[in-house]
């Protein structure tokens, strides 16, 4: 087969572009993002609950202080994301995460827009001094 000048340059062009595609593919393979598996750890759950919801309450279903905290938000017509620790298999572990995070294992522990408000008494003070309303108004 006889190659003309045009066919040689076409072949060189095709070869150069093929090499470019191969190099780009190799570059992409080596610099591709590493797939990570979502963690199901109690710590990851706590962080996700706090930062994915406007209001998060770590509670126990029978605790009178937790009931009072939930009632406060109900009166404000706010719907919190509530984690009932006594109804979860990992509730004790979540309380340990809260201990590491805020220094308390007690319930309720209230978070608004990612900020730790505290327990029921702290929440009541925040309502009285307007701090809770300020936190709720931030989106």
Image (spheres, rainbow, N blue to C red):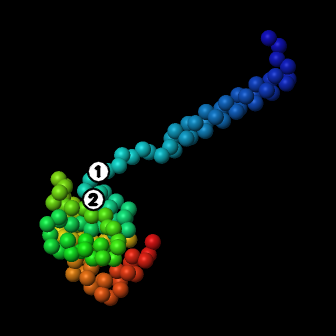
Q: Which residue is drawn at 21% across and 75% down?
A: 68
Q: What element carries label 2?
A: helix
Residue 39 at least partly seen = yes
What is the residue that sits farthest to the right in this orientation? 5
Label 2 neighbour load within 10 Å: few <14, some 14-19, many 20+: some
Seen in the image, is 113 located left or right of residue 63?
right
User: Mark 1 highlights which residue?
Assistant: 40
Q: What residue is shown with label 2?
A: 43
Picture coordinates of residue 41, whole percent (x, y): 26, 53
Which secondary structure, mark 1? loop
Image point 17% across, 53% down: which residue? 89
Residue 69 location, quadrant: bottom left
Horizontal and vertical percent for residue 78? 35, 71
Single out the residue that lies furthest toward the top.
1
Q: Nearer the viewer, residue 50 or 7?
A: 50
In this view, the residue farthest toward the bottom is 129
Against 120, residue 98 (above or below) is: above
Give coordinates of residue 43: x percent, y percent.
Answer: 27, 59
| Residue 99: quarter of image | bottom left
Image quadrant in which the N terminus is located: top right
Can residue 96 be seen here? The reply is no
Name the image quarter holding the C terminus.
Answer: bottom left
Seen from the viewer's position, the closer of residues 117 and 81 is 81
Is 116 left or right of 95, judged from the image as shown? Answer: right
Dividing the picture into quarters, in which one does residue 28 lie? Answer: top right
Q: Mark 1 near mark 2, Cβ–Cβ under 8 Å?
A: no
Residue drawn at (39%, 46%) of the image: 36
Left or right for 127, reference 10: left
In whole angstroms, how far apart are the C-alphas of marks 1 and 2? Answer: 8 Å
Residue visible at 25% across and 62% down?
83
């Amino acid at each position: 087969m006889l190659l003309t000048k045009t066919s040689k340059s076409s072949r060189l062009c095709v070869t150069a572009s093929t090499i470019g595609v191969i190099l780009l593919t190799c570059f992409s393979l080596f610099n591709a993002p590493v797939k990570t598996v979502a963690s199901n750890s109690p710590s990851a759950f706590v962080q996700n609950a706090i930062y994915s919801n406007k209001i998060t309450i770590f509670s126990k279903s029978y605790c009178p202080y937790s009931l009072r905290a939930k009632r406060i938000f109900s009166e404000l017509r706010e719907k919190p994301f509530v984690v009932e620790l006594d109804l979860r298999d990992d509730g004790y572990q979540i309380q340990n995460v809260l201990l590491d995070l805020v220094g308390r294992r007690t319930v309720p522990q209230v978070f608004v827009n990612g900020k730790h408000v505290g327990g029921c008494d702290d929440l009541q003070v925040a309502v009285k001094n307007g701090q809770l309303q300020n936190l709720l108004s931030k989106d």
